[in-house]
Amino acid sequence: MRIGVLTSGGDCPGLNAVIRSVVHRAVADHGDEVIGFHDGWKGLLECDYRTLDLDAVGGILARGGTILGSSRVQPAHLRDGVERAKGHVADLRLDAIIPIGGEGTLKAAHLLSEAGLPIVGVPKTIDNDIASTDVTFGFDTAVGVATEALDRLKTTAESHQRVLIVEVMGRHTGWIALHSGMAAGAHAIVVPERPFDIDELTEVVGKRFSAGKRFAIVVVAEGAKPREGSMAWDEGGKDIYGHERFAGVARQLSVELEERLGKEARPVILGHVQRGGTPTAYDRVLATRFGWHAVEAAHRREFGMLTALRGTDIVMVPLGEAVQTLKTVPADRYAEAECVL
Ligand code: F6P
């Protein structure tokens, strides 16, 4: 069998573990040939690839990023994208394509699958918002990075009697904010699923200072917004792909809270540090299992499917189902965290 693999969209710790696992299972166990397309769908559309043998994936299990590179280019961005992809798959005599990616990548994978290409998807995102899988690899690493940062920020916040508003990733969902906030004992957690009320947030933080505490830590997901009319708000506009540009929620909140509380407030934006570096053991294992099962699905010719974690099992889910909705933080999780606004 000839398999093409690619990594598309924002990178994520564990991508290399999937690539390695695909090559090990396909080449070493099945005697397949594997090629890796460079920079996501762009590599497939431009026929830019390299052969991946066992040597090519040596020593990459613990490495962050992706040895193949990534981009946000999607076949649908090009007028002839789907036809070009089909032509290159035929020219390269590929029996299966394994795209590893998040929401946008899986939508493109679904489109190509509907157009007849033999696709087995692997979900990835630090945001943990793919509905069809209980967990995506990268999430555990990102939560660990954010939690360590919050632990560190507590000591400097206390020294200076400040309010620190820590912005974590999560464009549409608050999973990283919720988990890192719970793990680090944040005093308030703000998530996109629940627009915040600035009066309520001011009260929560103010009460801490009134009770004699010297600092407060607010964790906020980058996609969080205030309730309609709650405070003046700059939306941030759109980027060149039409995605919402970040509004800078930590910056806007720090200005507002400082004025309302009369306490020094500072925004801290963790940004891409949450996506970089070595994956945790959990993420390496999940990524490795996804890679293994993707190859097995390809050999069963189970195309148009996606690997997913359900409980402790890896199952195959139709791509069409996977791209329907995002997995948001359910309301019953807020009560457990106590401090979700
Ligand atoms: O991969 C998802 C994500 O990490 C989001 O949380 C974030 O909004 C986005 O990527 C940022 O991506 P980039 O700046 O690399 O385009």
Image (spheres, rainbow, N blue to C red):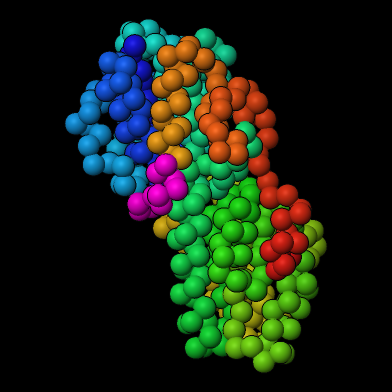
Residue 293 spot, x, y in % from top left:
45, 26
Q: Name the foreground residue: 71 vs 89.
A: 89
The quadrant holding residue 25 is top left
At 72% from the left and 67% from the top, the residue drawn is: 338
State the image quarter where residue 215 is shown.
Answer: bottom right
Judging depth in this view, the residue of 47 and 237 nearest the camera is 47
Side of 6 where 312 appears, left or right: right
Write the start and end of the magenta stretch as one range.
276-285
Q: Position of residue 224 (x, y in %)?
A: 66, 57
Left or right, 7 with reference to 120 = left
The spot of residue 341 in percent (x, y) is 74, 65
Judged left or right of residue 243, residue 16 is left
Residue 67 in the image: above or below residue 257: above
Q: Residue furthest left?
A: 55
At x 32%, y 17%, the residue is 30
The residue furthest bottom is: 212
- Using the image, determine if residue 286 lies above or below residue 198: above
The residue at 48%/43% (across/down) is 137
Check residue 284 for magenta coloring.
yes
Q: Position of residue 203 (x, y in %)?
A: 76, 78
Q: Is residue 247 above or below residue 137?
A: below
Q: Is residue 6 visible in this depiction of the protein?
A: yes
Name the residue located 33 percent from the left edge and 13 percent from the top edge. 2
Q: Quadrant of the N terminus?
A: top left
- Where, by quadrant of the figure, is residue 59 drawn? top left
Q: Is residue 197 magenta?
A: no
